[in-house]
Image (cartoon, rainbow, N blue to C red):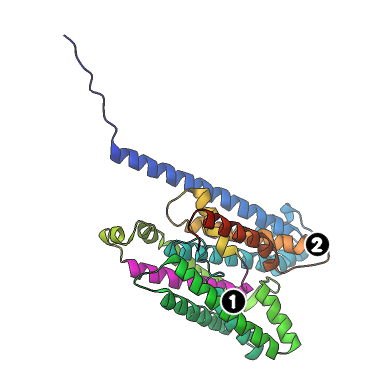
Amino acid sequence: MTTTLDVPRPDAAGAARDARALRRSHELRVVVVLGVLLAFAAAVSLCLGQAGLTPGEVLDVLLGRGDAISRFVVLELRGPRLATAVLVGACLGVSGALLQSVVRNVLASPDVVGLTAGASAAGVIGLVWLGLSGLALSGLVLVGALASAAAVYLLAWRDGLSGYRFVLVGIGVAALGTAVVSYVLTRGSVTDARVALTWLTGSLNGSGGTALTTLAASSLVAVPAALLQGRRLAVLELGDEAATALGVRAERARGLAVLTSVVLAAVAVAAAGPVAFVALVAGPVARRLTGTGGPPLLGAALVGALVVVVSDAVAQFAVPGTVFPVGVVTGIVGAPYLLWLLVRTNRAGRGG
């Protein structure tokens, strides 16, 4: 008499749970590593400069100790610049990841589709013609970004939102914003035009004061609000029908995500100008690192902050005696990436 052993069948639900747990564990490890790299880059940036400090001296200042000179260098000179770099990078990174997730196109970043161009046009008008700064300038920049976003969204809408139509309309709106900037600069004084041009390049010079306070307060509201939308956006990537079946209102979720993206981009532009390509690269890099199917918002925030902090250190110390705007460095890195992305997308059969 023979007996057969019952071989247990794999539990599909259990396998799915295990796969999700592995993905979450991997995402957590990536986030921790990015956080450590950001902390290291921040510590190095606080040590570098003409008044060089050791890591121990920086730590003493952060712990409430240290001499008066060290406290002045860390807390008054380098600290505000570093905080601005971190917050600007995080805002741009999350803004780009949100927009790319909504449009389902890696080219749909605020600096490509005209959002930062509209914000820049409003900012230049405020700087050159109205003499604004601080909170008033931030408000005007937000109005410009919202107007650009509304124009792109309405012009690109045709019974739904097509990613490439959104990008093409955005490029047109960006060209219009650039034209407004050029006109304002030609009508302003040489001094005002020089200040505005430095701001347009993307600069962290003069960080601190009201601008940093406004940036920090806005970031503390807008970044968590964006992170809370991650689950809904992940469901949206399954398609509108599946999202509706799972209780997510597709158009409402898209509109809220676009609005949050605009606010984040405007806050960053108001503080440091339109720092180029950070919003474009942060999301795809974070997605590749985490291997996640959904929008990697926290990873994008850390990647964006890391890119701006490292780029600012390079801008300050790569050429002795010369301090470049941080946007020069991000542009040098981001422009080849954009060209590679266009070639890769076209080869894959998704290009225009």
Secondary structure, mark 1, is helix
The answer to whether 260 is drawn above or below residue 196 in the figure is: above
Residue 307 placement, left or right of 223: right
Kindly indicate the quadrant of the structure image that contains residue 66. Answer: bottom right
Observer able to see residue 213:
no
* Label 1, residues with CA under 10 Å away: few <14, some 14-19, many ≥20: many
What residue occupies the far top of the structure in this picture? 1
Q: Which residues are magenta?
A: 250-276
Observer able to see residue 129:
yes
Secondary structure, mark 2, is loop
On the image, numbered disc 2 is attached to which residue?
Answer: 319
The answer to whether 56 is drawn above or below residue 275 in the figure is: above
Q: Position of residue 33 (x, y in %)?
A: 57, 48
What residue occupies the far right of the structure in this picture? 321
Q: Residue at x 41, y 59 (%)?
A: 230
Residue 162's disc is none
Between 313 and 339, which is closer to the camera in this rendering?
A: 339
Tell me, yes or no, whether the highlighted magenta stretch contains residue 260: yes
Residue 70 placement, left or right of 278: right
Marks 2 and 1, the one that precedes in the sequence: 1
